[in-house]
C-alpha cells in the first residue's frame, strides 16, 4: 500500500506532491482502487470496534432503572400533571417577576439602550459610513446592511464598518452574521479600542443556542482580563 | 393511548431532577468519573422515544431499543469530538438521528443485506478528494462486500488484526507502538500498510475464488 495515500489523507504531502497525487488518481485505476480499499478498511475496522462498544453500552443501558420507557397509572398521571402545573406557575412567577436580571436580559437591555440609534460621529469623516448610520437611524436596516456589506467587500479591514455591520445584523436578528462580524472585529489587534469581543458575547447571548452561554461567558472574561472595551458591563454581568 | 396500568412507578425516579441539556453536554465533556453518569442520564432522558419508534416505524421493541442506544452513542461521540455545535436543541438533534437510524434499520430489514456503512468518518475522508475523483472512489467502495471484508480481516494474523482495528478506532501510530511493543511509530506505519496490502490480496483472492 502506497505510503503517500496515508500522507495525503493526513494532509502531510507538500503542495506539488498533493497535486501529483490527485493527477495520478485520475489516470491510475490501481491507485484509485488502493485509495478506495484504504478508506473502506479504515471505516470497517473502526465500525467493528464501534459495534463492540455499542453492544457493551446497550447492555449496560438496559440495566438502568429509567432505561426503559414506563407506563404510569392514570390517577398518578393526573396528580403529576397538577403538580407540574403548580410548579410551572411558581417558576413562571419567579422568572417573570421583575428582579435580578440574567445575562440574556442584560444583553437585551444593553442592545436597546445602546443600539437604538447610532451616533453620527461614529464613523469619523467617512461619508459612506455616515450614510449607513443615517439609514440605520431611520430604521432602514436592510438598506444599511447592503451598504455596509458593499463597503466591507472593498475594505474588509475597516473596523468601524465591521462594527456597524455587526450591529445592523444584530438588529435584524441575524445572529450568525452578527457573531461573524464581531468576531472579525475582535480579532483585529491594532485598534486602540476594540469592542469586538464584548459585542460578540452580546450576540451569542441573544442567539441563545445551548453552547452560546458558555462561549459568551468566556468572551466576557477575556474582556475583563484584557481590559477591553465593555469591561465595565462585563464585570457586572459575570458577577 | 400511552397511559395504562402497568409497571409501578418508582417514586424516587419521579422526583429525580430533570437535567438540562447544557448540564448534560458539560458533564459528557468532563474528563472525570462523572462522565459515565451523565451519559446514562442522557440515555434515560429521552428513552421514551423507543416507544414512539416502535409505533411510528413498526419496528420491534428490541430493534428500536438498539437504534436508540446507537443514537445515544453517536450523540456522545459527536459531543466529544465537537461535531455537535449546539445549532439545534439536543432533543431535535437526537430525534433526527434516531429517526434516520430507524429508517436505516427498516431498509436493512427489507433488503436483508448489510450495506457498506457510510459513516461520517468515511464521508469526511472522501470529501478531502477532489470532486472528479470522489465519485470514482465512491463507486469502487460501493462494489466491495463488507461482510467478506470483515471475514478476511478476521483471517489475518492477530498482530495485523489488532493493528488495523486500533488504527480504525483512531489510535495514533505512536500509541499503537507503545501498546503493542513496537520500536517506533514509523515501524507501526510500515507494518500496518503491509498488513493492508495483505488484506487486499486476501480479499481479492477470496472474491475471485468465490
Image: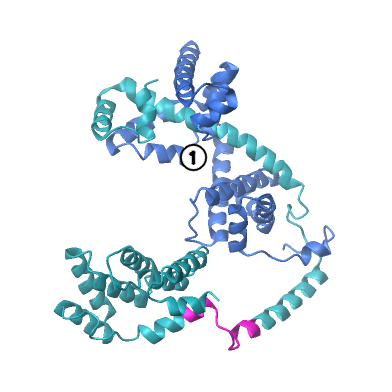
Q: Is residue A205 left or right of residue A70?
A: left
Q: Nearer the viewer, residue B203 or A5?
A: A5
In the rendered image of this protein, does residue B144 appear above or below residue B71?
Answer: above
The residue sitting at 51% across, 79% down in the picture is: A236
Q: Can residue A9 be spotted in the picture?
A: yes
The correct choice, above or below, for B18 with respect to A49 in the image is: below
Majority secondary structure of the magenta segment? helix
The residue located at (42%, 25%) in the rendering is A37
The chain painted cyan is: A
Residues A75 and B41: in front is B41
Splitting the image into 4 quarters, where does residue A81 fall?
bottom right
Q: Magenta span has A53?
A: no
Q: Chain of mark 1?
A: B
Asked if the magenta segment contains residue A98, the reply would be yes
Residue A170, image quadrant:
bottom left
Q: Which x, y percent locates residue A206? A: 45, 73
Give the residue at x 36% y 40%: B127
Chain displayed in blue:
B
- Give how far across and how far down residue B38 sits, in percent: 66, 55
Percent coordinates x, y for residue B75 in the rendering? 57, 50
Residue placed under numbered mark 1 in the picture: B119
The span shown in magenta is A92-107
Amino acid at each position: 500500500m502506497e505510503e503517500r495515500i496515508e500522507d495525503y489523507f493526513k494532509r502531510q504531502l507538500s503542495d506539488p506532491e498533493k497535486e501529483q497525487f490527485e493527477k495520478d488518481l485520475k489516470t491510475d485505476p490501481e491507485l484509485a482502487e488502493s485509495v478506495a480499499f484504504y478508506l473502506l478498511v479504515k471505516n470497517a475496522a473502526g465500525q467493528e470496534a464501534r459495534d463492540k462498544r455499542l453492544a457493551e453500552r446497550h447492555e449496560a443501558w438496559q440495566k438502568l432503572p429509567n432505561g426503559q420507557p414506563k407506563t404510569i397509572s392514570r390517577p398518578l398521571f393526573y396528580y403529576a400533571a397538577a403538580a407540574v402545573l403548580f410548579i410551572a406557575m411558581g417558576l413562571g412567577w419567579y422568572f417573570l417577576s421583575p428582579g435580578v436580571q440574567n445575562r440574556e436580559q442584560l444583553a437585551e437591555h444593553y442592545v436597546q439602550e445602546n443600539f437604538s440609534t447610532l451616533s453620527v460621529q461614529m464613523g469619523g469623516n467617512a461619508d459612506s459610513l455616515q450614510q449607513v448610520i443615517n439609514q440605520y437611524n431611520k430604521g432602514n436596516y436592510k438598506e444599511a446592511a447592503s451598504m455596509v456589506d458593499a463597503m466591507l467587500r472593498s475594505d474588509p479591514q475597516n473596523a468601524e464598518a465591521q462594527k456597524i455591520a455587526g450591529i445592523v445584523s444584530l438588529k435584524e436578528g441575524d445572529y450568525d452574521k452578527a457573531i461573524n462580524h464581531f468576531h472579525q472585529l475582535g480579532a483585529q489587534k491594532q485598534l486602540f479600542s476594540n469592542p469586538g469581543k464584548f459585542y460578540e458575547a452580546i450576540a451569542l447571548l441573544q442567539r441563545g443556542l445551548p453552547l452560546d452561554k458558555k462561549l459568551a461567558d468566556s468572551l466576557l472574561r477575556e474582556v475583563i482580563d484584557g481590559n477591553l472595551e465593555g469591561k465595565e458591563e462585563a464585570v457586572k454581568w459575570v458577577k | 393511548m400511552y397511559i395504562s396500568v402497568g409497571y409501578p412507578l418508582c417514586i424516587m425516579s419521579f422526583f429525580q431532577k430533570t437535567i438540562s441539556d447544557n448540564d448534560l453536554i458539560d458533564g459528557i465533556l468532563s474528563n472525570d468519573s462523572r462522565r459515565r453518569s451523565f451519559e446514562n442520564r442522557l440515555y434515560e432522558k429521552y428513552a421514551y422515544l423507543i416507544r414512539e419508534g416502535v409505533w411510528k416505524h413498526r419496528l420491534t421493541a428490541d430493534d428500536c431499543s438498539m437504534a436508540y442506544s446507537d443514537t445515544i452513542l453517536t450523540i456522545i461521540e459527536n459531543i466529544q469530538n465537537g461535531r455537535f455545535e449546539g445549532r439545534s436543541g439536543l432533543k431535535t438533534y437526537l430525534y433526527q438521528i434516531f429517526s434516520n437510524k430507524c429508517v436505516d434499520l427498516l431498509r436493512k430489514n427489507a433488503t436483508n443485506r448489510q450495506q457498506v456503512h457510510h459513516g461520517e468518518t468515511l464521508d469526511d475522508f472522501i470529501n478531502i478528494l477532489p470532486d472528479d475523483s470522489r465519485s470514482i472512489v465512491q463507486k469502487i467502495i460501493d462494489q466491495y462486500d463488507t461482510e467478506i471484508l470483515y471475514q478476511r480481516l478476521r483471517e489475518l494474523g492477530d498482530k495485523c488484526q489488532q493493528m488495523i482495528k486500533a488504527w480504525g478506532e483512531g489510535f495514533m501510530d505512536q500509541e499503537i507502538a507503545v501498546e503493542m511493543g513496537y520500536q517506533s511509530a514509523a515501524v507501526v506505519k510500515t507494518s500496518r500498510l503491509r498488513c493492508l496490502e495483505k488484506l487486499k490480496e486476501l480479499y481479492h483472492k477470496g472474491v475471485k475464488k468465490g
